[in-house]
Every structure is written in structure tokens, then in C-alpha cells.
Image (cartoon, rainbow, N blue to C red):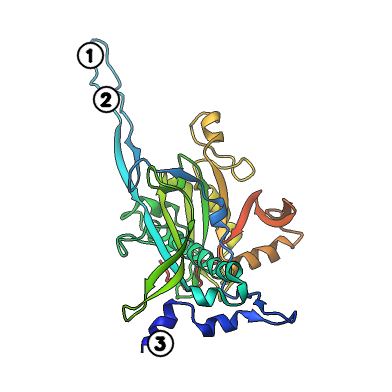
Amino acid sequence: MAQTTVGSTAITYADWAKRVGDETGQYSIARIIELLSQTNEILEDMHVLEGNLPTGHKTTVRTGLPQATWRLLNQGVPNAKSTTAQISDACGNLETYAVIDKDIADLNGNTAEFRLSEVKAFLEGMSQQVASTLMYGNQFVNPERFTGFAPRYSTSNTATSQTANNVLSGQGAGSTNTSIWIVVWGADTLHATFPKGKMTGLQHRDMGEWPVSDSAGNTYQAYRDHFKWEIGLVLRDWRYVVRIPNIDVSLLTGVSAANLINLMVRGLYKLPTAPVSATTIQTSDSPEVRANMGRTVIYCNRVIRTYLDLQAMNKTNVLLRIEEFNGKPITTFREIPVRTVDALLNNEAAI
């Protein structure tokens, strides 16, 4: 039992043996094929601002406009005012340590290379956890986390939530569903955040050599690395996010399939403002304000991205295109980039 406990949290000789190769006649750290890696481009796109609270960010939103009065001659009018409300979004603290027995790491003099192979796994794992929490995290279920997109847009019933106005169902009724998200990242729309006065992003600190204890309380020397990521999601204006849920991934073609092109067009028109290539309807804000609203992006998982790319190759389709940006092909819908998020599941329940 003790061996199982140690092996599940610490690097063992068996783990070390799996990471060395002698292809050159000398033992070196084997190149690890990262079968568990994902593509979560949302982490590259998200707008990040420092929070105004030690635990997150507080947003003031306008909830009511002042009402003027039609005045008769010789009669006065009452004073009026707008109304506001404050909403707080909390950050979560994702944190862990890597502990490697010094004697194992130092075998054959490849200490730095061996430790780097382990650090890469931690960075990938934490990135996947943050991406998953961005999509599905719910602090009311898991108080130590932050609330992501899905719990904020979890119903199509406008009687229970304002955000339901921006939920457009793909009509899938089973449990093999996924979602497409249309998101506008910006300082006044939607952004990630970190606690006031803290550091942003995934932090890695090489703590060097430390005495640590095993499961029996006995001490040995080990290298330790500390990983920390404090992050939250701030939804300042719910109108700038659209969810297209209930897309049955087992039924993407045929007469019963969801019309994704139709749904994405309708979704873009839900936004108060968007690039002129996408919609012709804009808010009453000034052109300067509209220009700074943020960056519009469409997110979907690999299954939907594949389907959209195949549609983009259809010459009769003028809305979807495959273009080149920074030397790499990207899919665009009305000139809005379509990005891949592997954290988006294919087994979402219908809402």
C-alpha cells in the first residue's frame, strides 16, 4: 500500500526507467510523446485585467435608465435617475508542487533535462484544468474554483435568466451534445482577471533542493517546483457572449442536423455590436466606444471545427473561409476567427 501511495504522487525508479533511452549509445532523457496534450486556443485569446479586489473583480452595471416626463405647460416634472448594481466575480487559486527524489533526478547527470520533462507535464495539466474551468467551472458547486461560461448560460428560459436571451439551441435532445460560443473579449465586455496586487498567469518557481517527508514521515532530499495560477472570469456585459448549445455531434449531417451556419448568423446578431463584416446592427454607443468594445472570437471543439472546415471548402459557401494568419491557416466566419477548444465536451446534457 505504501508503494502505491508513493508512486502515485512522486517520481519512482520505474518512472525514471521509462524516461531514458540509449539510442545514441549513452543514456539520455527520452523524448516523451505527449498523448494527453490538448489544443485550447481560448487561453491564447482571453483578455486579462488586474482585479479591483484582493479576491477578484467587482463590476458596476447599469440596470435602469432615467425616465423623462411629458410636461404640460405650467406644470413641473419629477426628478429622475438611472439605477445600477454591483456584481463580484471571484478568482480561483490553482496550485501544486512537483517533488522529485534528488538521487533519481541526478542519475546519469541529466538533472535539468529530467526535471524539465516533469515541469512540462505540470504546465500542460494546469492549462487543461484552467481551460475546462473557463468552460464549465461553477463556484457554487466547487467554491474553490471560479465560475466559467456554461453555468452563466445554462438555460434558454428567459423568465429565469437574462442570459437566456443569448442561448440559441441546436435542438439536440440527448447527451451527445456540444456548444459553440461566440465571445467578445474586452475591458468592458468579458475578460479574465487576477487578484489585485498579485501576478498574472501561470507561475512556476524552481525551489531547488529541500528535505521532504515520505508517507511514513521519514525524510529524504528532493527537488521541488511550485506551480500557481490565480485566475477568474469577469462577465461585465452578458450581451457580448452567445451560446449555441444542444448541437448533437452524432448528427451533424442530414435533414435533422442542426443548421450551424444559420445558428451562427443568428448568434452574431445577438451581440450589441460586432465587426461590420459580421453584422450591420450596432449599439447606440459612439463609434469610438464601439471600436474599443473588444475582439470577437468563435469557439468550438475539434469535432465542430472539422465540420466547419469541410464546409469552408465548399465553394458555394461564402460565409466560412480558410485564411492565413501569421503563416498558419485559420477558419473564419464572416471574418471572425474560429478557434479550437478541446476542453469543450461532446457529452453535454441538453438545456
Disc 2 target residue: 80
Q: Which amino acid does label 2 sit on?
A: Ala
Which is nearer the eye, 202 or 52?
A: 202
Q: What element carries label 3?
A: helix
| Vertical side of 46 occupied by 94: above or below | below
Dot placed on the residue nearer the N-terminal end, 3 or 2:
3
Q: What residue type is labelled 1?
A: Gln
Q: Which mark is residue 21?
A: none
Within-10-Å neighbours for mark 3: few <14, some 14–19, many 20+? few
| Vertical side of 79 occupied by 88: above or below | below
**What is the C-alpha distance between the residues marked 2 and 1?**
16 Å
Q: Provide residue 192's location: percent of width, then percent of height.
A: 45, 49
Dot placed on the residue nearer the N-terminal end, 2 or 1:
1
Within-10-Å neighbours for mark 2: few <14, some 14–19, many 20+? few
Disc 1 target residue: 75
Q: Which mark is residue 3?
A: 3
**What is the C-alpha distance between the residues marked 1 and 3?**
88 Å
> Which residue is at 51% across, 28% downward?
286
Number of marks: 3
**What is the C-alpha distance between the residues marked 3 and 2?**
72 Å
| Vertical side of 160 occupied by 307: above or below | below
